[in-house]
Image: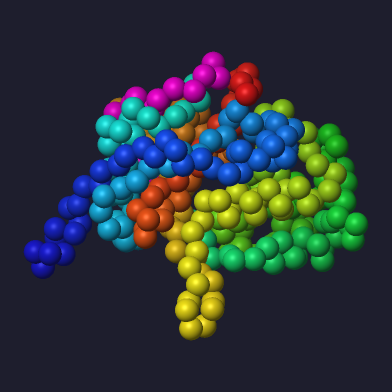
Amino acid sequence: MADETHAFNKTFKFNLLPNIKSAFLEDSRISELLMKWSMLGRISVQAFNFDQVFQSYMMKDFVLNFFQDPCVKNNLHVLDTSGVWKPLGRDVTRVDVEHVPCTKVSVDIFDPIFSSGIVHPSGHITKCFHEVHPDFDKLRMMLIEEDSDNYHVVSACDRQEFLFRLFKHIVLGGELCQYEDIISPYIETAKTIYKNLVSVQKDSETKVISIISTILKVSAYDDYGLCYPSERDSEQTFTYLCIDPFKRHVYVLYHNYGIGLFNKL
């Protein structure tokens, strides 16, 4: 019992890993797409290591330790309202943590989109009328309109998957997003980001590949309220912690939608 109590009282310590770069942000082709989608300069990945064994039941304590760690406080980048990157520098008192399912090792999660008329056989996204949004399409309709005919072509379970969430985030893009006419850039970019952030292992006997990463969607609060990833709540302002328990690395995927921000590249 004492060992069990001790396990719950662990305090994780973190160190910045400045030399670990995210390959997708170094890819010129993806950078061009992120610029087109108004996400370049507003999206970042940082890596930290940690000093204790991580298990999923520890996730809330892990996240609170993360934001309260001096190294994280002084090095975790956020985008302020003037569009300038700066350290978090806030005294976090509580956190919200959502465990995000992450099981997919292929892109078959997107198959229903191709078989439902949302996308033509050519890969072109079907256009449609919308009362509010000009130049709308069935893909965005499926992603955001719960009463649309196609909303449920992707199951509720698959919609929660990290791969699908990445796909949705890049389709919706940033404040000044220029949308694609064909679906392939969205899927390929989501797949690349996913492969960069998620760790896998192969069973030596069955050769089956499985995900070992734990993905957490997080937000943090100080004494004044929400302070991270932004003081303003938005679906397109998000942070995911991607935890590799074997390497003891945590990768921080951050994006600020940036209402009123100047997109600094």
Query: Does the rendering let one see residue 64?
Result: no
Residue 215 % position (x, y)? 46, 54
Looking at the image, which is closer to me, 157 or 106? Answer: 106
- Residue 113 is covered by the magenta coloring: no
- Residue 93 is covered by the magenta coloring: yes
Magenta span covers which residues?
Answer: 81-96
Looking at the image, which is closer to me, 171 or 202? Answer: 202
Query: Does the rendering let one see residue 85?
Result: yes
Q: Which residue lies furthest to the front in this view?
A: 19
Give the total number of marks visible in the rendering: 0
Whether residue 232 sits left or right of residue 154 in the image: it is left
Residue 160 % position (x, y)? 56, 58
Looking at the image, which is closer to me, 54 or 229? Answer: 54
What secondary structure is the stretch in magenta mostly built from? loop
Name which quarter of the figure residue 213 lies in.
bottom left
Residue at 78% x, 52% y: name it: 184
Residue 214 % position (x, y)? 43, 58
Whether residue 167 sits left or right of residue 57 in the image: it is right
Residue at 73% x, 48% y: name it: 186
Q: In this view, does 171 lie above or below 53?
A: above
Whether residue 34 sits left or right of residue 219 in the image: it is right
Quadrant where the image shows the C terminus: top right
The colour style of the image is rainbow
Q: Is residue 61 above or below residue 106?
A: above
Residue 50 % position (x, y)? 30, 48
Residue at 38% x, 42% y: name it: 48
Quadrant where the image shows the N terminus: bottom left
